[in-house]
Amino acid sequence: MIDKKIEIKPLEKRLYLSSPTLHGDEQKFVQEAFDTNWVAPLGPNVDEFEKVMAKYVGVKSAAALNSGTAAIHLAVKLAGIEPGDIVLCSDLTFAATVNPVSYEGGKQVFIDSERETWNMYPKALEVAFAKYDGKNLPKPKAVIVANLYGTPAKLDEIQAICDAHGTVLIEDAAESLGATYKGKQTGTFGKWNAISFLDNKFFTTPQVA
């Protein structure tokens, strides 16, 4: 056994995970929000942001929230998740993807990943639906699929499986804004979808559901 104290020296220079940068128009728009007193909670900037994002992604409407977690939580509530309800979830993802299920008292059942994308494996999802068939075990109330590291899951296959079982699909596209799957933008496959602008993802702005 080595009985030697290890001296930990503080970093000489602070290392930032994702420090924001504001130049030119960004500074102008931030100042405009202050000058017009539309800092919180909403206002014309947020309204325009929602419209622009909905148009870019290709959905009818969008709602800006304070975080991606809040966006998924809203989707979970809209899906009607109640205590004891089963929700099938991606197993390789950030905790925020599945925490909202716990907030509503639901139970997560994690679906294995496939090799190509590390995302939810459609065949494993089919196995889960065969097990949770509504007879021996409760039928799943929803499926939450995450697009890991900007790479889309096999969303058409997953969507088809959910449709076949009459189960709501929620797409966590927090890390895949701008990515397309077979020509279609991610964040449009589920009944409800969440994208994110957290500072260590894309831009420092509100979240959108």
Image: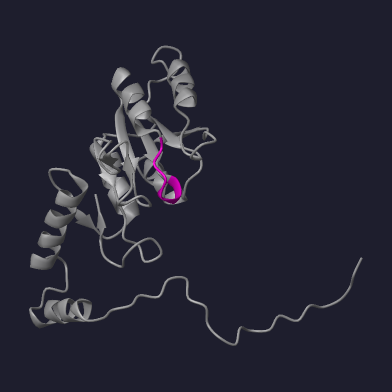
Is residue 69 in sight in this rendering? Answer: yes
Total marks placed: 0
Residue 100 location, quadrant:
top left
Drawn side of residue 93 relative to residue 63, left or right: right
The spot of residue 4 in percent (x, y) is 86, 76
Q: Position of residue 162 (x, y in %)?
A: 33, 25
Residue 105 visible in the current orientation: no
Residue drawn at point x = 45 percent, y = 13 percent: 136
Residue 48 pos. (x, y %): 11, 61
130 left or right, relative to 78: right
Residue 152 is one of the magenta-drawn residues = yes
The residues colored magenta run 148-153
Query: How is the model colour-coded?
Result: one colour
Residue 10 vertical placement versus 157 (above, below): below
Which residue is painted at 18% across and 54% down in the image? 53
Q: Quadrant of residue 85?
A: top left
Q: Quadrant of the N terminus?
A: bottom right
- Residue 135 drawn at (x, y percent): 41, 12
User: Can you tell which quarter of the image residue 66 is in?
Assistant: bottom left
Residue furthest to the front: 183
Q: Residue at x 7, y 78 (%)?
A: 36
Give me the residue at 46% from left, 50% from top: 94
Left-right relation of 206 to 94: left
- Tell which of 142 and 32 is nearer to you: 32
